[in-house]
Image (tube, rainbow, N blue to C red):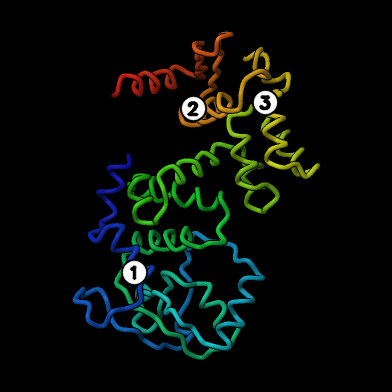
Amino acid sequence: MTNKTTKNRGLGRGLSALMADVAQPADTADTNPSRRPDLLVPIETVEPNPDQPRRTFDEESLSDLTASVREKGIIQPLIVRRKPGSETQYEIVAGERRWRAAQRAQLHEIPVLLREFSDAEVLEVAMIENIQRADLNAIDEAAGYRQLMERFGHTQEELGTALGKSRSHIANLMRLLTLPDTIQAYVSDGRLSAGHARSLIGQENALDLANKVVRDGLSVRDIEKLVRKGPASTKRHAPARSSKDADTIQIERELGAALGMGVHIDQNTTGEAGKLTLNYKSLEQLDDLLRVLSGG
């Protein structure tokens, strides 16, 4: 499915070239025919991309940006393309926050870089720009990685290299997307940290624990202690769970998230050997596991 998506999207420049469009100003000496020098256009001729993946903008940071734009103007041009079917209107590819701030600052003209992007490239650049933002919450960042991988066929290694992130950082964030939607919402609105959420991965009573964190203001260490104790609902599958060390519990959670099934590790009294139990929910899931184990 991924290969098919990659073939059909029609991108010739690749992720690194798109990254350059997001991160670097225009170079008037650039020989790339898709690049053009900066333009100064009326702000009313520019409009947001209707498929912009980022739907919420922090009011406080937008107000700060507005004050900066009012005082110093827009330092980094927006990236735009011509609106399909129009020669005088432009659609934002990257820089909607700057456009919103410019509107609030009542600027009449804004600097833009005009690019010739397809619909697929517009979406990809918008995702990349959002992921690069420092104020992006862990869930939105993880969802951005997943979209780039699923829609455009990028691997974790490719994303890590292009975005300056480690493969483990990307993999660990994407594991958060295995948590229930309610917990993901807690992370998105700041009621839970990414550290809290990581501690809940693979826990059958994850939502109860998350609610307790929100209600009682527990620290990450507090929730890790609760996880080690293990409630009765999880003990029926692992009677000795309360005696497991933190490393074993973490391995269970991460392996369970990676395989999409219940994982239980029971060590013997010496701690040198033990039993690994995988719980599958369907024959299809068992087939997938067998393919992974056989290298298929």
> Which residue is tagged 1?
21
Mark nearer the viewer, 2 or 1 = 2
| Farthest residue, direction right | 216
Left or right: residue 96 versus residue 36 is: right
x and y, in percent, of residue 260 in the image: 49, 28
Left or right: residue 94 versus residue 66 is: left
Q: Earlier in the sequence, mark 2 or mark 1?
A: 1
Mark nearer the viewer, 3 or 1 = 3
Residue type, mark 1 in image: Asp
Q: Quadrant of the C terminus?
A: top left
Residue type, mark 2 in image: Leu
x and y, in percent, of residue 174 in the image: 49, 42
Q: Nearer the viewer, residue 198 or 144?
A: 198
> Which residue is tagged 2?
255
Q: Earlier in the sequence, mark 2 or mark 3?
A: 3
Secondary element type, mark 3: helix
> Which residue is tagged 3?
228
Q: Nearer the viewer, residue 229 or 232?
A: 229
Q: Quadrant of the N terminus?
A: top left
Q: Nearer the viewer, residue 165 or 97?
A: 165
| Farthest residue, direction left | 31
Secondary element type, mark 1: helix
